[in-house]
Amino acid sequence: MSAMNIDPFKGNLDTLDEYADRISEVLQCPITIEDSNHRLIAYSTHDERTDQARIATIIGRRVPEKVINNLWKEGTIPALLETDQPVRVKNIDEIGLGDRVAISIWKNDEVLGFIWAIEIDKTLNEEELSLLKQAANAVKNKLLQLQVRKYKKEERFQEFFWRLLTGHIKSHEEIVEKFHDIHITPPSSFSIAIFRFQEDITPEAERQISYILKTMQRLKLVLYTIDCNDLILLISLDSIEKPTEERKQFVESFTKKMKERFGVDQIQASFSSIYSTYKQIEKSYEESLTVLKIKKTFPDETAHILGYQELGIYQLLDVILEKRKLDQFENYSLKKLVDYDERHNSNLVETLEVFLNKDHNINDAAKELNVHTNTLSYRLKRISEIGDIDLRDPNQKMTLYIDIKLMKLKAN
């Protein structure tokens, strides 16, 4: 009887490791089974033939990031996310990847995982490729059981994370205990990061986000949750020598991969200061939200800013604004310039702001305003005359700089 007419994967197979061994026996090649985020969940054990990519996957319990990146570039993973048919992968020497065949494990329209068969001494024929399809169908129910357990676990994680973000757990001891209850080692130093998407995050987008987060291996992600169009992360900074640089690279890598792989762009990002006291998680969250608020109000001035500590004077604008309101203070010089602009349809306030933004550098300011330096010098002279301003006085310049920002803040 042909192997096409029987199912060699039926029987008393209780674990995915047993399935991996059975598939390996049937196809006579090493097998690995991964979840949808390329984490190793089973591999055949009785066959010593392998390649460097498989060894690294088994040791690290996940596919190395450089291998995943290459498989995206070569079109392998995009193909696996589109079809339930076997996909043949040619060797890529620079990452230690030998010839192999991969197949996705599907439940309706969702990929649950992958089976990889390494072609060490042979090339799988059509009948064996059909057997690989049978194998993918056979392990589907086992992966579904894992997925249900994973979702229940993630629900516990998210409930705990929201209690931290909203300050509903105040005791350091209780927070540490809760971390251990969900089998997570609490970080000794951490930061909150937020990625703000253009639209609310759909279940499909959430799967894409989860995929990127779990295949990136730069920083350790402790917890994450989603709030409408915000992805909120608790990031461990333990043993990170240059945390600001590493966080910026993390942001750059995440946004780049979301755009390249899933066509999602225009993601705003922010992160808080670095803390070591868990009661500061709520404060960290507020800091990250503040960065996003400031970046929305002052997009040009803060385009390069990601972290709360980089905000400088912008950290204090809300406080200064409240004091200005309490004192009923109005900047006389700025009011004169605003009135003049309104009457003459001019842009003296904008000119002054650019000049101050550029640290009083006439050449840089003229370039930003797209005017000749002589034209800018004339405008600055008019600003001094109309507003009764001494642009050589650092105190006056600092006060004007702050009050221009406050004016824009009030307008939003």
Image (cartoon, rainbow, N blue to C red):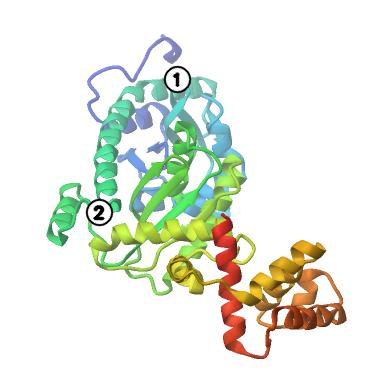
Q: Position of residue 298 (x, y in %)?
A: 59, 61
Q: Is residue 38 above or below residue 240?
A: above
Quadrant position of residue 48: top left
The nearer-to-camera label among 2 and 1 is: 2
Asked whether, in this view, residue 282 is left or right of residue 121, the answer is left
Q: Is residue 38 visible?
A: yes
- Dot label at residue 167: 2
Q: Are marks 2 and 1 in contact (CB under 8 Å)?
A: no
Helix, strand or loop under label 2 = loop
Q: Is residue 235 visible?
A: no
Name which residue lies at 48% across and 23% down: 109
Q: Earlier in the sequence, mark 2 or mark 1?
A: 1
Helix, strand or loop under label 1 = loop
Q: Which residue is mark 1?
A: 108
The crowd level at tag 2 (other Cα within 10 Å; few <14, some 14-19, many 20+) is some
Q: Nearer the viewer, residue 261 or 179?
A: 179
The three-letter code of the residue at mark 1 reads Asn
Total number of numbered discs in the rendering: 2
Specify the quadrant that holds the C terminus: bottom right
Asked whether, in this view, residue 87 is left or right of residue 241, the answer is right
The crowd level at tag 1 (other Cα within 10 Å; few <14, some 14-19, many 20+) is few
Name which residue lies at 61% across and 69% down: 404
Quadrant position of residue 398: bottom right
Q: Position of residue 397 (x, y in %)?
A: 62, 82
Q: Position of residue 340 (x, y in %)?
A: 75, 68
